[in-house]
Image: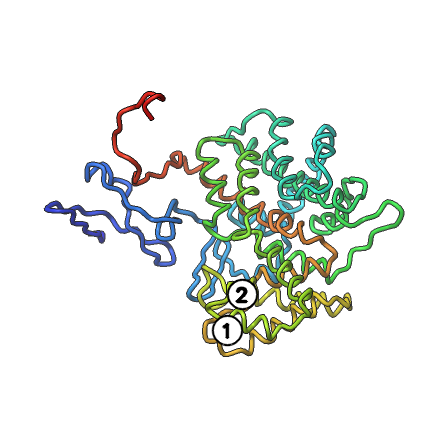
């Protein structure tokens, strides 16, 4: 007999099944709660204790610092895999054979041309427009140039939609950055790998040949892998709930990009660099700011340390710290902002206050350092996060649609006025 959970409301008792996941996670299945109890619901602000779906994509254990994609540890994937391999794994469930990976990449390259009319939309944005707003708008605009909806029951149509967005989004990312830097737009080169071509499209100049730095490329590859999926976070949940209305893939992804923009989500790595800038402008005294962070009466908040999900350490931060050190050593950059970052890092790793509370530097802290060292403007940091998260969003959208999940429709507890009589305007 399967386990059940018992709920007592007044004189009535109800039983609900308990679901066990493949990693022994437990959940009380309350999908019949409202019907059985004549309207009673649960309330869970922020959905911190609510499972919106079953998913076979990503396993996360914040207490133990574990992150796995489709059963593979993030450590193994970051060390041994290419980003495109990880994208295929997330979306289709298995690591690709060499033949499948070559075809996947070839099909993506075939779909990497963005309709030239999209350039006109980009031209309409002022140069000061935030690139996340540009990316969200252009991703949504792709729907106009690909008007037919995806038949999710057709493997061929689903695959075609996936390779289209995998090909076109890096182009839009590079266009957003090149607009900031005043560089002409380009499409890169089909002779390069996926990550190398992203770098080429972002950084190449029309009057010189672009050479890919292998250490920087390896760091970017790792960053994209580390950001590729992270279970049911804000933007991923947004993609799923928008897609649950049977909105198309591009529209759902555009909504996810907008959700990622917020400083409490993908914008955290931008917030880290803005904090470092303010510390530098105030003289660069990191000890002063460490003291402010420990002072409960001080509103200053140390960005890029600790994580709301990982209660021990962020496994992604351990991986990317090594890559950050390699990039800084290789490029030999003399940057006072990066000096402030390294000083904060060392103090936090050795300060008992932070060590005892497990407030270690997280992936946002190190990703911001790497992006700055690469020469990526701070307002582009969240755009790079979106590029990495793309395959995870696609995988989650695909899983949701193939699973025939119902439209998302949360309930609420109404706390407003009860029935009132209307008063004519003369009597108000």
Residue designated by label 1: 354
Q: Where is residue 404 in the image (x, y as percent from the top left)?
A: 41, 35
The colour scheme applied to this rendered structure is: rainbow
Picture coordinates of residue 87 (x, y %)? 58, 48
Residue 134 drawn above or below residue 84:
above
Q: How many numbered circles does the render carry? A: 2
Of the pair 385 and 226, the residue shown nearer to us:
385
- Horizontal and vertical percent for residue 244? 44, 35
Where 46 sits versus 78, above or below?
A: above
428 relative to 219 in the view: left or right: left
Left or right, 261 with reference to 176: left
Quadrant for residue 162, please give it. top right
Q: Residue 305 carries which label?
A: 2
**Closest to the observer: 133 or 165?**
133
Q: What element carries label 1?
A: helix
106 vs 152, left or right, is right
Near mark 1 (Cα within 10 A), the count class, few <14, some 14-19 or many ≥20, is some
| Left or right position of 246 against 186 | left
Q: Residue at x 71, y 42 (%)?
A: 128
Q: Do the residues labelled 1 and 2 touch (CB within 8 Å)?
A: yes
> How dense is the environment of label 2, judged by Cα within 10 Å: few (below 14), some, or many (20 and up)?
many
| Vertical arrangement, residue 294 with respect to residue 236, above or below | below
Of mark 1 and mark 2, the one earlier in the sequence is 2
For the C terminus, which image quadrant? top left
How far separated are the C-alphas under marks 1 and 2?
Answer: 9 Å
- Under circle 2, the secondary element is loop
Residue closer to the observer: 9 or 273: 273
Q: Where is residue 368 in the image (x, y as percent from the top left)?
A: 64, 59
Q: What residue is shown at x 29% (from left), y 41% (from top)?
A: 31
Q: Which residue is situated farthest in the left direction here?
A: 11
Q: Which residue lies furthest to the right in this view?
A: 207
Q: In the depicted view, which residue is nearer to us: 80 or 397?
A: 397
């Amino acid at each position: 007999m399967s386990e059940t959970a018992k709920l007592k409301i007044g004189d009535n008792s109800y039983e609900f099944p308990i679901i066990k996941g493949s990693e022994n996670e437990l959940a009380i299945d309350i999908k019949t709660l409202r019907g059985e109890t004549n309207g009673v619901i649960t309330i869970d602000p922020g959905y911190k204790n609510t499972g919106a779906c079953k998913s076979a994509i990503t396993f996360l254990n914040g207490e133990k610092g574990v992150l796995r994609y489709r059963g593979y540890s993030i450590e193994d994937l970051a060390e041994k895999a290419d980003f495109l391999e990880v994208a295929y794994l997330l979306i289709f469930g298995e690591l690709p054979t060499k033949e499948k990976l070559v075809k996947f990449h070839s099909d993506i390259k075939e779909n990497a041309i963005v309709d030239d009319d999209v350039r006109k939309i980009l031209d309409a944005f002022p140069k000061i427009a935030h690139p996340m707003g540009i990316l969200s708008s252009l991703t949504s605009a792709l729907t106009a140039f690909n008007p037919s909806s995806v038949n999710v029951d057709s493997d061929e149509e689903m695959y075609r939609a996936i390779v289209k967005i995998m090909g076109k989004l890096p182009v839009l990312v590079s266009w957003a950055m090149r607009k900031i830097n005043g560089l002409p737009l380009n499409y890169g080169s089909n002779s390069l790998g996926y990550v190398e071509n992203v770098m080429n499209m972002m950084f190449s100049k029309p009057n010189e040949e672009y050479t890919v730095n292998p250490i920087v490329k390896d760091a970017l590859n790792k960053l994209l892998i580390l950001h590729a999926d992270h279970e049911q976070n804000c933007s991923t949940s947004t993609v799923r709930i928008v897609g649950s209305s049977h909105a198309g893939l591009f529209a759902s992804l555009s909504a996810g990009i907008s959700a990622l923009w917020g400083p409490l989500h993908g914008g955290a790595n931008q917030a880290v660099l803005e904090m470092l800038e303010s510390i530098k402008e105030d003289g660069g005294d990191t000890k002063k700011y460490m003291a402010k962070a420990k002072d409960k009466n001080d509103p200053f908040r140390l960005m890029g340390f600790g994580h709301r999900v990982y209660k021990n350490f962020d496994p992604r931060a351990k991986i990317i710290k090594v890559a950050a050190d390699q990039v800084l050593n290789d490029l030999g950059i003399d940057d006072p902002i990066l000096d402030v970052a390294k000083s904060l890092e060392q103090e936090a790793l050795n300060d008992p206050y932070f060590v005892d509370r497990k407030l270690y530097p997280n992936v946002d802290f190190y990703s911001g350092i790497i992006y700055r060292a690469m020469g990526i403007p701070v307002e582009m940091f969240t755009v790079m996060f979106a590029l990495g998260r793309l395959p995870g969003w696609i995988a989650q959208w695909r899983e949701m649609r193939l699973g025939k999940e119902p439209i998302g429709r949360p309930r609420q507890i109404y706390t407003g006025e009860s029935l009132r009589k209307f008063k004519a305007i003369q009597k108000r």
